[in-house]
Image (tube, grey):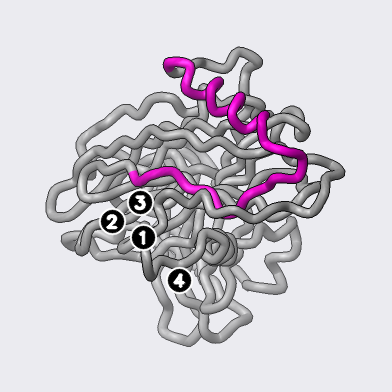
Amino acid sequence: MHNNLTWRPRRLQRYRPFFMQIIFHFSPRPKMRGGSLSLAVLALASLPLGAHAAPYATNWVSSQKSAVRLIAAVNGPAEAYYETGVEIRLDPGALTYWRFPGGAGVPPVFSFEGSENVDEVKVLYPAPTRIDESGTDVFGYRGEVAFPIHVTPKDSSRPTVLALSLRYAVCDRLCLPAKAETNLALPPLLAAAPPPIRATLDTGKAMGEPAIESILAAAEARAPISLAAGDQDKKVSIEKIAGATPPSWRVTASDADPQDLFVEAPEGWYFESKKGDRPGEFTIVEIERPKIDGAAAAPVVLTLTEPRQSYEFQIELAADAAMP
């Protein structure tokens, strides 16, 4: 679990990527915040059976050139997990980063320490866009972004409280650290209950804003589909470019109109990707590797973004000899 963010000067290090999805497991000792979480659970426990309400949202928590809130849509009984999300709204011109920020930047760090009746939390990352930041390619978001979060309760017959502590970066000429803390109380996910009674608990909604359900559905659609081993052959072909220095690979997508390709690598490795000369073609170039002797291979995650859907899959990029 990521509880602390070590803030270092930008452009001085590469960051370890978050491969695919991040799953948090909780200890049986939830931390209390002035009793507020327990009070929220007691309030939800007083709801009649089946009184599921959608949508839910916290108030916006303002930070540096941005605001954050937790949202959820509890649409019916017998669900395996809560469909929730962390929504970030950025000032015009500002950006924040993906789980792998690219040539510079800091990824978001989510902590759910202090949540109640929570067994597992899975954070999904919408596919990013490539942004030119003073001549450096960074990967992230402008405007606003919602990260889908699947929350599995320990006991689906009891209320749940999701507590969020988020650390992230917001950049607009200067890059500033930002932090938000909030919590959201949710009703039980009952295995058998009467039809839900819909009630608006969206305290952050304003006239003209999209519905919480729409925000979450759009965020889920932006999250890449993880392809099983071997299935990537249906989406891309990858070949090493003979004699290329530094080591390089040609990636050709089966869809002739892919938008971009992002490469996440283990600590010590860094690869750049760029569009090739032909439609659907990309080139991956090895920029950094650990100081090792002999042949080496890096297990990387490729994220291929397309107009309607994005995909991610893990492969190995092998080089024949160490770079000088």
Figure check: 286 above or below 92: above
Residue 260, labelled with which disc? 4
- Residue that mark 3 sits on: 97
**Closer to the N terminus: mark 1 or mark 3?**
3
Kind of residue indicated by mark 4? Asp
Q: Is residue 51 one of those drawn in magenta?
A: yes
Kind of residue indicated by mark 3? Tyr
Left of 22 or right of it: where is 261?
left
148 or 177: nearer the eye?
A: 148
68 or 11: nearer the eye?
A: 68
Q: Residue at x 24, y 38 (%)?
A: 177
Circle 1 or circle 4, nearest the eye = 1
Local secondary structure at mark 4: strand
| Badge 4: residue crowd in 10 Å (few <14, some 14–19, many ≥20) | many
Q: Residue at x 65, y 15 (%)?
A: 28
Q: Name the spot of residue 125 as percent of width and height, x first.
A: 51, 53
How far apart, in angstroms, are the residues tagged by discs 1 and 3? 11 Å
Is there a contact, CB below 8 Å, between mark 4 and mark 2? no
| Badge 3: residue crowd in 10 Å (few <14, some 14–19, many ≥20) | many
Residue bounds of the magenta highlight: 34-60
Is there a contact, CB below 8 Å, between mark 1 and mark 3? no
Is there a contact, CB below 8 Å, between mark 1 and mark 2? yes
How far apart, in angstroms, are the residues tagged by discs 1 and 4? 20 Å
How far apart, in angstroms, are the residues tagged by discs 3 and 4? 16 Å
- Residue that mark 1 sits on: 144
Q: Name the spot of residue 212 as percent of width and height, x first.
A: 52, 59
**Closer to the N terminus: mark 1 or mark 4?**
1
The extreme right residue here reads 192
Kind of residue indicated by mark 1? Glu
- Residue that mark 2 sits on: 90
